[in-house]
Image: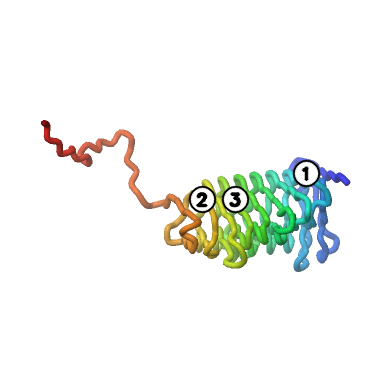
Amino acid sequence: PNVFLTGIRTTLRTSKIVAANANTHLFTMTDTVGVHNLYLSGVTGANYCLVNITGATANNGYIRFENCQFGTTDTILSLSSTAFDTDVQLNTCEFGCGDQFNNGFVVDGGSGAGGIIPAELALHDCNCDDLASTYPNYIGYAKNNGELQVFSGYYDSGQNVSTGTCFQADSGAQLELIAVKIDSFTTGIKTVNSGSAPIINCNAVYLTTCTADLNIAHTGTIGGFTGISARAKVTNNAPNTFSVNFSEQGYGTVIDAITDISALVSEPNITAT
C-alpha cells in the first residue's frame, strides 16, 4: 500500500507524532511511503527506532522524508536489505536540536550475495546540531554492503563533543560524502577493520574540531578523501587503495594576485649560440 503523512508546515514541531510506548518502533515501513513536515519522537527503549524499514517487497517502491525533524530516540532509522531495491531518501530534515538520540541512521545491506540488492539511503541537505549529551554513537553507519550517500549538510554535535563517530563503514559497505561539514566528534569518518573492504568517497568535506578527523582502519579500504582536515588527525592504513588529498588550515602561503614576486624568480642560465 502507498502511505502518505503530511503535517502543517509552519515550524518543524507544529505537527508531532510521539510514541505512546517507548519500547516499540514508532513506524515500520516497507514499500512506498511519504512523510512530510512532521516531528517524530519518544522511542527510547534500547534497539528500537523511530523508523524501522524492513526492506521493499516489490520493485519500484520508494520511501521519502521531507522537512521532518527526528527527536528523542534510541535509534533514528534502521534500514535492512531484501531481494528488492530499497530506496530511501531524506530531504531537508533535522535531528538533534536539543534532543538526545543514541544512534543515528544504520543501513544494513545483508550479505550482498545471492542476488540480494543492498539497502540504499541518501541524506540530502540534512543538518544535525546541538546534541543533548555526548551521544550518539554514530550519525550514519553503512554496514554489510549497505550504501549511504550524504549530499550537502552540516553535522555538529554542539557544545558536547560526541564520544562517537559521525560517519562510518564496515564490511563491503559504501559511503559517499559530498559538500559536508563535520564538527566536534571523537572521530569524523572511519572504516572498521572487519570483513571485506568498504568503499568511501569523500569530496569537498570539511572536518573540524574532531579528536580524529579521518581513521581508515580497514587495510583494504577503497576510495579517497578530498577536503579540509588536520594533518595530525588523519590515519590511513590503506595507502595503496585509499588516497588522501586535503588542505590544512594554517599551512601554506597565499600570494596575493598583485604581489610582486619577481625577486623570487631566478633567470634561466642560457648561453646564446
Q: Residues within 10 Å of mark 3 (few under 14, many from 20)?
A: some
Residue 272 lies left or right of residue 189; in this view the side is left
Distance between mark 3 and mark 2 Cα atoms: 14 Å
Label 1, label 3: how far apart the Cα atoms are: 25 Å
Nearest-to-viewer mark from 3 and 2: 3
| Left or right of 226 on screen, residue 268 | left
The structure residue drawn at horizontal position 88% and vertical position 46%, both measured from the top left corner, is 1
Query: Sequence-wise, which precedes: disc 3 or disc 2?
Result: 3
Nearest to the observer: residue 86 or residue 163:
86
Q: Is the C-beta separation of discs 1 and 3 under 8 Å?
A: no
Give the labeled residue for mark 1. Answer: 36
For label 2, the SS is strand
Of residues 33 and 193, the one nearer the viewer is: 193
Which label lies toward us, 1 or 3? Answer: 3
Using the numbered discs, state the Cα–Cα distance from disc 1 to disc 2 in whole angstroms. Answer: 29 Å
The disc, 1 or 2, on the residue closer to the chain's N-terminal end is: 1
- Reply above or below: 32 against 28: above
Q: Which residue is mark 3?
A: 176
Judged from the image, the secondary structure of the residue bearing numbered disc 3 is strand
Q: Residue furthest right?
A: 1
Farthest residue, direction top: 273
Which residue in the protein does label 2 denote? 206
Q: Is residue 101 visible?
A: yes
Residue 99 shows in the view:
no
Residue kind at label 1, given as amino acid type: His
Q: How busy is the neighbourhood of tag 1: few (under 14 within 10 Å), some, or many (20 plus)?
A: many
